[in-house]
Image (cartoon, grey):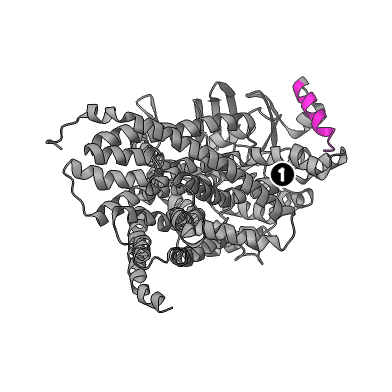
Amino acid sequence: MGNYHFNFAIVWRYADKLFNGLLLSIELAALTIAIGMLIGLILALVELDGPRWAKPFIRAYVEFVRNVPLLLLVYLIFYGIPSAIDLEYDATTSFVATLSIYSGAYLVEILRAGLDAVPKGLIEAGKSIGLTPFGVLVYVRLPMALRIALPSLSNTYVSLFKDTSIASAIAVPELAYGMRWIETQTFRTMEVYLLATPIYLITSYGILMLLRLVERRYAIAR
Amino acid sequence: MTIFLQILPFLIDGLVTTLLVSGSVVLIAILLGIPAGCTLVFGPIWLRIPIRLYADFVRGVPILVLLYFVYYGLPAIKVNLTSMTAAIVALTAFKTAQIIEITRGAFQSIPIGQTDAAKSIGLGLIDRFIQVLAPQAIRRFLPPFVNSVVDTVKGSSLVSLLGIVDLMLSLQQVIGRTHVALPLYTIGALMYFAINFPLSVLSRRLEKRFI
Amino acid sequence: MNDIPLEPVISMAGVTKSFGSNQVLKGIDLAVTKGQVVAIIGPSGSGKTTLLRCINFLEEYDGGSIKIDGIEVGYKDAVGERRRRSDRDLARVRSDAAMVFQQFNLFPHLTATQNVMLGLVKARGKSKTEARQIAHRWLARVGLSDKFEALPSQLSGGQQQRVGIARAVAMEPKVLLLDEITSSLDPELVGEVLAVVKELAVEGRTMILVTHEMAFAKEVADRVVFTDQGHVVIDASPATIFNEQPNDRLQVFLSRVRSFGH
């Protein structure tokens, strides 16, 4: 350890790569969560209330995605598909699509459990005051399901934020890529990590704390 | 089809590396993580705090960043590890934190009445642990543990980014030579699936049986 | 009943206990002599269960003293200073005041026999063979001779509670502590459990029971203690408590309970 001279100044010059990277990571996560929730919600509803022939397909999707590494999925969609079909997209779009599909598989499970846990009595109450099935869904089932699922959702969202680091493998300029870039440019490995690790920690726990606040207000302990 | 038979040995080599890495990580993580988890639940506060801090720290950072740090960062302070060692160290650090959490959850989900009942018939701390708490904790530990093994196998794919020729990298090397991307990626996915899916099923069966 | 005054098996003097800022026990005095059955009744929050749990040190009491056969329960008197007993000491003392729980708390991974045997082997040092014989004897006594190898998940609530009683009594404790043992049972299962308790009372076991079953308390107890807001309000015979009701708060409490059909 003795011969290493810390030089933060050099690293600091490139700090914008880290902060822009962080912003991009957060954007990627937010977008992914939005799309993933949509996928998860629709598929969960289909699985619970939809035609029986749809279930095996949804099951296959969930099982496949959850048992295959994210990195492989990223490569498959970014390199694999354009080589077979005449389709082109940039790395960022590809990654968002991949992570959304990935997160959808996890969110289906969580949302299905949440919807399933809504007490039948509440649904019947909704029907008895004259709500249509769609109304019951929007005004009774969804709010309840989301509140029940909040703890699991919080953990998943934070995980997804951390998973955005995989985008660095296809050169998306998010935080992890920024770290590597500065490190290859300056060879100041230690400083970069000492700077970037707290950024990840603070952001991860920041998101978690925020979600816990929401939980305190809205979540239902079962 | 002959191409497939030609590349298969490369993929199998990669697969073996993946299994070796995953297996080592799981083993070491259990040896370190379970005692640490037990200490977190039962130990004195001056041990609990560092373990808690370690677990929270490691889990707040992506595995990839941890891998980069161990592989690129440590040599900068003259700690030179082979890529294989670095990869295993980083993955193990992450998984140990996971195991600590699972162990903690396993003990804390045991109803407190069990401890009361054990105390009431005169069992001391060691007997309470061995006869009453540990058997119940194991049942609660196994389902999430098997699940975490699946996560480890998936996480091991990241070592390909350090140049270690696991299944993921051997797959890319073969694709690089044969230019048949999509089918090969699909085959790779199926290979990972073949390892992980039985584990996932096992985890669910255990959950139904024990919880 | 002996007419020679006996050293109380349990003596509690000035016991206080707080949970955070809430003082649950505000100075409890209670003495139980050998062979007595004492029923503790009172509204929720009056401290009844806490009182019981202090006797076998499942809760650490803040002040006062609790003695089993003259020996201080949780603490050693060392040069006037209170020092908490070691884990091993505590274990010994606890098995003298075995408890039966409202939630049964049977060990789910052990059979009925094993549940009863565990304390005998580990705390009383008996051999496995001897412990098994004792366990079988007690399980038969509580009417479960066909359930020796059953797991708790295979037993009804009433059966589980009877195993709980067997587990506690098999330890031959100086006093048996029963914490609302029928409160979690379906009504039709309550009778079988109370029948066992009655038998034990008739045998001369020293018991302290916290209960809501007023008719049962009246039938089985030698004394009834009414607690309210952390104090012992009145400590008298069942006849006095239930028939005369010489206290306002007691009257209010009993009328509320009676209105539920007790």
In-image side of C65 versus B28 (left or right): right
In what quadrant of the picture does the N terminus of chain B appear?
bottom left
Residue holding disc 1? A118
Q: Which residue, as the protein is rendered here, is positioned at the far left?
A: A3
List x then y, in percent, for residue B176: 35, 63
List x then y, in percent, for residue B107: 48, 47
Q: Which residue, as the protein is rendered here, is positioned at the far front?
A: A86
Q: Is residue B184 above or below residue B126?
A: below
Q: Is residue C239 above or below residue B11?
A: above
Question: Going 70% across and 50% down the picture, which residue do you hit?
Answer: A45
Crowd class of label 1 (few under 14; some 14 to 19; many from 20; radius 10 Å): some
Question: Going 87% across and 39% down the picture, which residue do you hit?
Answer: A130
Question: Going 33% across and 56% down the picture, which residue do you hit?
Answer: B160
Residue C224 visible to an observer of this rendering = yes
List x then y, in percent, for residue C209: 66, 40
Return the residue nearer the eye: C189 or B63.
Answer: B63
Which chain contains the residue that carries disc 1? A
Return the residue nearer the eye: B196 or C51.
Answer: B196
The secondary element bearing badge 1 is classed as: loop
In what quadrant of the picture does the C terminus of chain B appear?
bottom right
Which residues lie in the magenta part? Answer: C249-262
Q: Which residue, as the protein is rendered here, is positioned at the far bottom?
A: B2
Return the residue nearer the eye: C95 or B207.
Answer: B207
List x then y, in percent, for residue A202: 41, 31
Q: How many marks?
A: 1
The image quarter containing residue A172 is: top left
- Residue A28 colored magenta? no
Question: Going 54% across and 63% down the picture, which residue do you hit?
Answer: B201
In-image side of B32 versus C46 (left or right): left
- Residue C255 colored magenta? yes
